[in-house]
Image (cartoon, grey):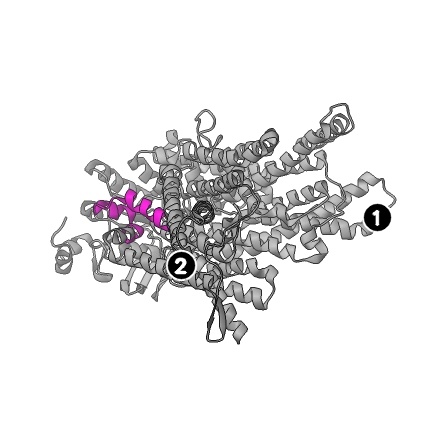
C-alpha cells in the first residue's frame, strides 16, 4: 500500500513537471525554451537506449552492436499503429477529451513498439547468443543493418522517403515516465537473483552453467528485455519527431549507444545515464564547431578507453570505491 | 551467356578488391584476435593518398604505367605507416585489456578517421584523374576494359606476393607462429611487437592497393567510401574463415560474385543486404567460416 | 544403487581418444578418488560427468537416471557440483555474491517479482543472504563477504570455490585438483575439510588429485586411469601396491 502511494506521488510529480516544462519552456518567456525542451526529450530517449543496452552488454557481458535495429522496429511499429490505427481510436473514444485519446493512442502504439521490438530481439537473439564474443558483435551488427534495409524497402512505412505524419503524442511526462520504468526495472533486476545470474554469465559462462544457471535462456532474456525498452524508446522518439527515416537507425546510432555506455562505465547503471546525458549534450555544446565535433568525440572515446577503460563511473566508482551487486 | 560471363568478370574484379581488404582484417585477427573496425578506413586513406599523389605526379612521370606504379607504391607505403601508427598508439596500450575495450577503441579509431577525412578532404567526392586511358580489350567475344585487367593482375600479384612472404620467409613464419599462440611465439624468441606491426603494415598496404584499384574503375572517392566496403570485406574474411589467408581470398571472391549477380539479376536495392545475409547465414551455420577450424575452449 | 555410474564411457576429440571405455561407480556418501598421470583423461571425465562434453559411447547415470549429454545446468540442478582445476570464480563479483549465484536455481522467484520487489522476493532474498553467510562462516570467509573475489589470496579462492559449489546443495561434489599449490599444512586442512563436508552435508566426493598424500589419506576407493583407459581400481592400500599403477607413475609420489 505504501509503495502504491509512492508510485502515485512520483507520477503526479512528473505530471507537475510536465506542466512546468510546458509553461516555462514551450509557451513561456525563456527564449530558447523549445530547444531546451527538445534536448531534455532526446536525453530521456537516449537514457532509455543506454540503460537497456547496458543490460545486455554491461551486465550480461554480451557484446551487441545492433541496438539501433530494435530502436527502429519499435519506432516504426508504433508509428504504424498511431498513423493507420488512429481512426479506430477516434471512433471508439471520440467522446473523451483529446488528452485521454492521445494518451491511449500513445500507450497502444508504444505497446505495439515494445512487442514488435521484443519479438525482433527474440528472433535475433536465439540464433546469435550461442556465438562467441566477436562473432556475436558482428552478427548483431549485421542484423541491425538487415532490419534497416528491410524497413527501407517497405513502402507503407515510407520507404526511402521516410514515414511522415506521425502525431506528436510524446512529451516530457511520457518520456520520463518511461525513463523511470526503464531505470527501475534494470536496477531491480540487477539487484536480484536474476541479476546475479546475468552478472555471473558475464564473469564466467562455464562456471555459471556449472552453478545451475541456464545461460542461453538468460542471455536471450536480457537481450529481449533490452530490445523491448529500445522499442519503447523508438515509439516515444517517433511520436516526438513526427517523422522517421532509416538514416537515423544505422550502425552509427548503435555505435553512439555503445559509446554512451562505455564512457559512463560498462555495467554501471548510473554510468549509462551519465553517458547518455553527456552524449546528448555534447553535440549541442559543439554546435558552433560542428565539423570538429565528431573528430573530437571519437578522439575522446579512444582516450577514455585507453586511460580509463572502466569509464567514468565504472567498477571503482568516481572515487575508486568498490561497487556491490546487491 | 555473354552477359553472364561479363557479370562474372565484374564479380571477380569486385571480389579481388574485397579480398585485398579482407586480407588485412584476417591477418590482424589472426595475430591479435581483434576486429580492426578501422581497416575499411585505411582503404579510404589509400584511395586519397593515391589521389593526391596522382595530382602531384600528373604529367611529370613519363608514361601512365610508371605513374600508376608510383602512385600505388606511395599509397601502399603511406598506409602501411598509418596502420603501424594506429596499432602503436591506439591498440598496443590496451592489448592486455578486455576484448570489449579493444573493439570499442577500434570503433573510435574508425569514426575518427572518417570524420577527420571529412574535415581534411571535404565530404564531397573527389575524382581520380585518369592516368591510364581506358581501352577496350576483346577477349573471345567479351569486352574487358584494361582497367579491369589491371585490377585483376595487380590484385593477383599482391596476393601471390603476400602468400610467398607468409609461407616462405622467416618473418612470415613468425607471423604465422604468433597467430597460433602469441605467448609461445614470444618464448621462442620472436619479437611479437615487430610481428604485429608488420602485420598491420602489410594489411594496410594491401587495403591501400585495393583503394587505388577500385578508383581505376570508379573514379569518385569520398571519406566514407571505406564504411560499406570495409564491412563487406570483413564479411568476406569471416565467410572464408577469419584468421585464414586463403579464406580471405575465397571469401572475397564469393562475395564479389554474389553481390554482382544479385545486383545484375535481382534487385540492386538488396545489393548491400546480400553481404549481411551471407554474414548471418555463415555465422549461424558455420561460424568458423568455410576454411576455418572450430576453436574449442579448454575447460 | 550407486549414486554415480560411469559405464564404458568413450570420448574423442578429432583424432584423439581422450577417454576410452572407462567405467566406475561412486556410492552415496563415498569419498572416491580419480588419479592418473597428466593427460590421462581425468578432467575430461569430469567434464563428461558435468555435461560440458557428451560421451561418444557409453552411459553416465545419476541415481539410475541417464545424464550423459544433458546440459551442464540441468546436471547441476540434478545434484552434481564441481570446482575447477584453474579456479573459475566470478572475479568481479563479491565473495558473498559468488555463493549467492549458486543459490539461484533453488530460489524460485519470478522476474516480475524481482522487478516489483514483491514480498515473496524480499523473503527469498533474505533467506538466500542468511544461507550464504552461514556457508561463508563455515569456511572462515565471512569477513571477506563484500570483497571482490579476485582480490582474495589463492588459498581463500579455493575455499570459496568449494563453498560456492556447496551452495547448490549437491549430492555429489567433484573436486578438480583442490590441493594444487597447497603446502603440507594446507593439504592437511583440506583433507579434514573434505571429510567434514561428507559428514555434515551428506554428500559423496569425487576427487581428482595429484597429491598422493591427500588421495591416499582421504579416499575410500580409488580408480586409476592412464591414456584414457582404466588400469586399476581399489582401496588406497590395493592401489599403492598395484604393479600397473606403479608402472604408470614410475613410482612417483
Q: Nearer the viewer, residue A4 or C217?
A: A4
* Residue holding disc 2: B248
Answer whether residue A316 is visible to the viewer in this image. Answer: yes
Rendered location of residue A85, percent (x, y): 78, 52
Residues in magenta, as a range:
B176-203
Q: Nearer the viewer, mark 1 or mark 2?
A: 2
Q: Quadrant of residue B162?
A: bottom left
Which mark identifies residue A90? 1
Circle on res. B92: none
Task: Identify which residue is drawn at 43% across, 35% down.
Answer: A309
Q: How many marks?
A: 2
Q: CA distance from mark 1 to mark 2?
A: 58 Å
Q: Residue furthest right?
A: A95
Please tell me whether residue C189 belongs to the stretch shown in magenta: no
Q: Residues within 10 Å of mark 2 (few under 14, many from 20)?
A: many
**Looking at the image, is B229 positioned above or below residue C153?**
below
Magenta-colored segment: predominant secondary structure = helix
- Identify the subunit bearing mark 1: A
User: Residue C190's spot in the image, x, y percent?
Assistant: 26, 40
Amino acid at each position: 500500500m505504501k509503495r502504491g502511494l509512492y508510485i502515485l506521488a512520483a507520477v503526479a510529480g512528473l505530471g507537475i513537471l510536465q506542466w512546468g516544462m510546458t509553461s516555462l519552456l514551450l509557451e513561456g518567456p525563456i527564449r530558447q525554451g523549445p530547444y531546451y525542451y527538445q534536448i531534455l526529450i532526446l536525453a530521456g530517449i537516449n537514457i532509455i537506449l543506454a540503460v537497456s543496452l547496458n543490460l545486455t552488454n554491461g551486465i550480461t557481458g554480451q557484446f551487441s552492436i545492433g541496438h539501433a535495429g530494435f530502436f527502429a522496429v519499435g519506432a516504426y511499429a508504433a508509428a504504424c499503429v498511431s498513423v493507420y490505427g488512429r481512426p479506430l481510436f477516434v471512433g471508439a473514444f471520440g467522446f473523451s477529451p483529446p488528452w485521454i485519446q492521445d494518451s491511449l493512442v500513445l500507450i497502444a502504439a508504444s505497446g505495439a513498439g515494445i512487442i514488435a521490438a521484443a519479438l525482433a530481439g527474440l528472433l535475433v537473439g536465439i540464433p546469435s547468443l550461442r556465438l562467441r564474443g566477436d562473432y556475436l558483435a558482428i552478427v548483431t551488427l549485421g542484423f541491425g543493418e538487415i532490419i534497416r534495409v528491410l524497413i527501407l524497402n517497405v513502402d507503407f512505412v515510407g520507404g526511402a522517403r521516410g514515414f511522415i505524419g506521425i502525431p506528436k503524442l510524446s512529451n516530457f511526462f511520457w518520456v520520463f515516465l518511461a525513463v523511470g520504468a526503464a531505470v527501475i526495472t534494470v536496477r531491480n533486476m540487477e539487484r536480484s537473483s536474476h541479476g546475479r545470474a546475468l552478472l555471473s554469465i558475464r564473469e564466467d559462462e562455464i562456471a555459471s552453467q556449472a552453478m545451475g544457471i541456464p545461460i542461453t535462456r538468460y542471455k536471450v532474456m536480457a537481450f529481449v528485455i533490452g530490445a523491448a525498452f529500445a522499442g519503447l524508446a523508438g515509439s516515444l522518439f517517433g511520436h516526438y519527431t513526427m517523422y522517421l527515416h532509416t538514416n537515423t537507425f544505422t550502425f552509427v546510432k548503435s555505435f553512439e549507444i555503445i559509446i554512451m555506455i562505455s564512457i559512463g562505465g560498462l555495467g554501471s547503471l548510473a554510468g549509462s545515464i551519465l553517458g547518455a546525458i553527456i552524449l546528448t549534450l555534447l553535440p549541442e555544446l559543439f554546435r558552433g564547431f560542428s565539423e570538429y565535433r565528431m573528430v573530437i568525440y571519437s578522439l575522446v572515446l579512444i582516450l577514455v578507453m585507453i586511460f580509463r577503460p572502466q569509464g567514468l563511473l565504472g567498477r571503482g566508482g568516481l572515487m575508486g570505491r568498490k561497487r556491490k551487486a546487491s | 551467356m555473354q552477359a553472364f560471363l561479363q557479370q562474372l568478370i565484374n564479380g571477380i574484379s569486385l571480389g579481388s578488391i574485397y579480398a585485398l581488404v579482407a586480407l588485412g582484417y584476417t591477418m590482424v585477427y589472426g595475430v591479435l584476435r581483434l576486429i580492426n573496425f578501422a581497416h575499411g578506413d585505411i582503404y579510404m586513406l589509400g584511395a586519397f593518398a593515391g589521389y593526391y599523389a596522382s595530382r602531384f605526379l600528373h604529367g611529370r612521370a613519363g608514361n601512365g604505367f610508371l605513374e600508376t606504379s608510383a602512385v600505388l607504391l606511395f599509397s601502399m607505403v603511406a598506409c602501411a605507416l598509418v596502420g603501424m601508427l594506429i596499432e602503436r598508439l591506439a591498440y598496443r596500450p590496451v592489448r592486455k585489456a578486455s576484448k570489449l575495450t579493444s573493439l570499442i577503441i577500434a570503433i573510435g579509431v574508425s569514426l575518427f578517421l572518417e570524420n577527420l577525412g571529412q574535415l581534411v578532404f571535404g565530404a564531397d567526392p573527389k575524382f581520380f584523374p585518369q592516368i591510364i586511358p581506358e581501352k577496350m580489350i576483346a577477349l573471345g567475344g567479351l569486352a574487358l576494359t584494361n582497367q579491369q585487367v589491371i585490377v585483376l593482375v595487380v590484385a593477383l600479384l599482391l596476393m601471390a606476393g603476400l602468400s610467398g612472404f607468409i609461407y616462405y620467409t622467416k618473418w612470415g613464419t613468425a607471423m604465422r607462429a604468433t597467430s597460433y599462440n602469441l605467448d609461445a611465439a614470444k618464448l621462442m624468441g620472436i619479437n611479437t611487437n615487430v610481428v604485429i606491426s608488420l602485420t598491420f603494415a602489410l594489411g594496410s598496404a594491401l587495403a591501400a592497393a585495393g583503394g587505388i584499384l577500385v578508383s581505376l574503375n570508379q573514379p569518385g572517392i569520398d571519406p566514407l567510401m571505406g564504411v560499406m566496403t570495409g564491412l563487406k570485406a570483413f564479411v568476406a574474411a569471416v565467410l572464408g574463415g577469419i584468421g585464414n589467408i586463403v579464406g580471405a581470398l575465397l571469401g572475397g571472391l564469393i562475395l564479389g560474385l554474389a553481390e554482382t549477380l544479385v545486383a545484375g539479376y535481382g534487385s540492386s536495392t538488396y545489393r548491400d543486404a546480400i553481404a549481411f545475409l551471407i554474414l548471418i547465414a555463415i555465422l549461424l551455420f558455420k561460424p568458423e567460416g568455410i576454411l576455418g577450424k572450430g576453436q574449442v575452449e579448454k575447460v | 544403487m550407486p549414486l554415480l555410474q560411469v559405464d564404458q564411457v568413450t570420448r574423442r576429440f578429432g583424432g584423439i581418444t581422450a577417454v576410452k571405455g572407462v567405467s566406475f561407480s561412486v556410492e552415496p556418501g563415498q569419498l572416491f578418488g580419480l588419479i592418473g598421470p597428466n593427460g590421462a583423461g581425468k578432467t575430461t571425465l569430469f567434464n563428461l560427468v558435468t555435461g560440458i562434453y557428451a560421451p561418444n559411447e557409453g552411459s553416465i547415470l545419476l541415481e539410475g537416471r541417464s545424464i550423459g549429454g544433458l546440459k551442464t545446468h540441468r546436471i547441476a540442478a540434478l545434484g552434481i557440483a564441481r570446482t575447477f582445476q584453474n579456479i573459475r570464480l566470478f572475479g568481479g563479483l563479491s565473495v558473498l555474491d559468488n555463493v549467492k549465484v549458486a543459490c539461484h536455481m533453488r530460489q524460485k522467484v519470478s522476474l516480475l517479482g524481482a522487478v516489483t520487489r514483491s514480498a515473496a522476493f524480499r523473503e527469498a532474498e533474505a533467506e538466500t543472504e542468511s544461507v550464504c553467510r552461514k556457508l561463508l562462516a563455515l569456511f572462515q570467509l565471512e569477513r571477506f563477504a563484500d570483497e571482490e573475489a579476485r582480490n582474495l589470496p589463492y588459498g581463500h579462492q579455493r575455499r570459496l570455490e568449494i563453498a560456492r559449489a556447496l551452495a547448490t546443495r549437491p549430492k555429489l561434489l567433484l573436486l578438480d585438483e583442490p590441493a594444487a599449490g597447497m603446502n603440507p599444512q594446507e593439504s592437511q586442512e583440506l583433507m579434514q575439510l573434505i571429510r567434514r563436508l561428507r559428514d555434515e552435508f551428506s554428500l559423496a566426493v569425487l576427487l581428482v588429485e595429484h597429491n598422493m598424500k591427500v588421495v591416499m589419506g582421504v579416499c575410500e576407493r580409488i580408480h586409476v586411469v592412464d591414456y584414457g583407459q582404466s588400469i586399476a581400481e581399489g582401496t588406497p592400500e590395493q592401489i599403492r601396491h598395484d604393479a600397473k599403477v606403479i608402472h604408470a607413475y614410475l613410482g612417483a609420489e
